[in-house]
Image (cartoon, rainbow, N blue to C red):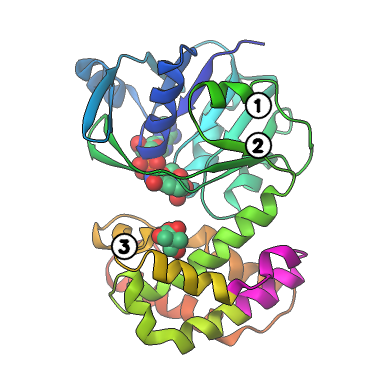
Amino acid sequence: MSSTWHILGAGSLGSLWACRLARAGKAVRLILRDGQRLQAYQQAGGLTLVEQDQPTHYAIPAETAESSGPVHRLLVACKAYDAAPAIDRLAARLADGAEIVLLQNGLGSQDEVADQVPHARCIFASSTEGAFREDDWRVRFAGHGFNWLGDPANPAIPEWFDDLHEAGIPAEWTVDILTRLWRKLALNCAINPLTVLHDCHNGGLLAHLSEVDGLSNELAQLLQRCGQPEAAQNLDEEVQRVILATSANYSSMYQDVRAGRRTEVHYLLGHACRAAARHGMVLPQLERLHRRLVDNLRARGLPCA
Ligand code: NAD
Ligand code: KPL
């Protein structure tokens, strides 16, 4: 098994992981979207990571999915809606027993990928680190956080896990990765769509606490029904705590909408509503929120799935 880290997607989180792994002396190769992006990257000569206002350049080699050679260890760092199409293009290069780390927020995209590549091991990740693109190939590390990784099908820790610690990537292996992902999904569902609909930063939701509470209660019922009682525990309190702790921030969905970017709604609120329907649950506030959000996105000309 090759120990090279292939990193698909040189956006915010992909660049953050690639630069830290390369800095620690790990073999890293970026997989870029197409030949045009590869050419632009080669002209730039590498990635720049800005940490505490200090830019550092990393000349990390890059290729496209159509390049040759097997892929044994892959970090998928694109948006949730891009993950399955990206893996489709790369599937023929994935070695038997390849390990794929899926960094996508929300739920649903991980299973889409796992269904495509039954010969690979899919490891799910949940990240609270923050990074954003200042420019092409230039990423700012904006918020320290943590990464939880786990494999719902196999509790064994991967042999490369220490690479992350050596690279200064804060991470823990957990057998409860689905609990983490469901909890984050629920927080995102209770906060992010309302910030779009009320056109406010997270703190603006303090003026709409009964709406927030109603959603938190329905989300907690859904988590219980989906076999995630731990993720449901004191959800309403945590939602309010997060609103207060991030009151000056704009949610990631708000920022996407404002920038005219596609959102990950299909894998967040959309996933929650589909799960409720599968269980025959009627959750009126959640469903109404989904309808309002979809209408809002449509009116802006943004994809609503
Ligand atoms: P991003 O848009 O900055 O980067 C995604 C990159 O993937 C882009 O450069 C895009 O061109 C590339 N890409 C898409 N399809 C590709 C393909 N087929 N081949 C190669 N490259 C491809 O996104 P991001 O902010 O890094 O987010 C990635 C995931 O991480 C999302 O699910 C997001 O919700 C989650 N997340 C992000 C942050 C953050 O701070 N940015 C924090 C926590 C979680
Ligand atoms: O994760 C978030 C986001 O903006 O996506 C928080 C800050 C928790 C709000 O849901």
The residue carrying mark 3 is: 249
Q: Which residue is mark 2?
A: 123
> Is label 1's Cβ within 8 Å of ligand 1?
no
**x, y (%) of residue 171?**
57, 36
Is label 3 or label 2 in front?
A: 3
| Other residues around mark 2 within 10 Å, as few (<14) / some (14–19) / many (≥20) | many
Residue 45, how many percent across, how many down? 24, 15
Q: Amino acid at mark 3?
A: Asn
The residue shown at (44%, 40%) is 78
Q: Which residue is mark 1?
A: 99
Q: Using the image, determine if residue 151 lies above or below residue 263.
A: above
Q: Main secondary structure of the magenta part?
A: helix
Query: Which residue is more in the foreground, 28 or 175?
Result: 175
Q: Position of residue 286 (x, y in %)?
A: 55, 79
* Residue at x-position 32% and y-position 62%: 302
Q: Let me know if residue 233 is in the magenta part.
A: yes
121 left or right, relative to 148 = right
Q: Counting residues from the N terminus, which is met first, the one under dot 1 or under dot 3?
A: 1
Image point (59%, 27%), residue name: 91
Q: Does residue 228 lie above or below 1 as drawn? A: below
Q: Quadrant of ligand 2?
A: bottom left
Left or right: residue 161 compared with residue 227: left
Say whether disc 3 or disc 2 marks the residue closer to the N-terminus: 2
Judging depth in this view, the residue of 126 and 167 nearest the camera is 167
The quadrant holding residue 303 is bottom left
Q: Nearer the viewer, residue 100 or 88?
A: 100
- What amino acid is found at the position of numbered circle 2 in the picture? Ile
208 lies left or right of 137? right
Q: Which residues are magenta?
A: 218-235
Q: Is residue 174 above or below residue 230?
A: above
Q: Secondary structure at mark 2?
A: strand
Query: How many residues crowd mark 1 within 10 Å: few (<14), some (14–19), many (20+)?
Result: many
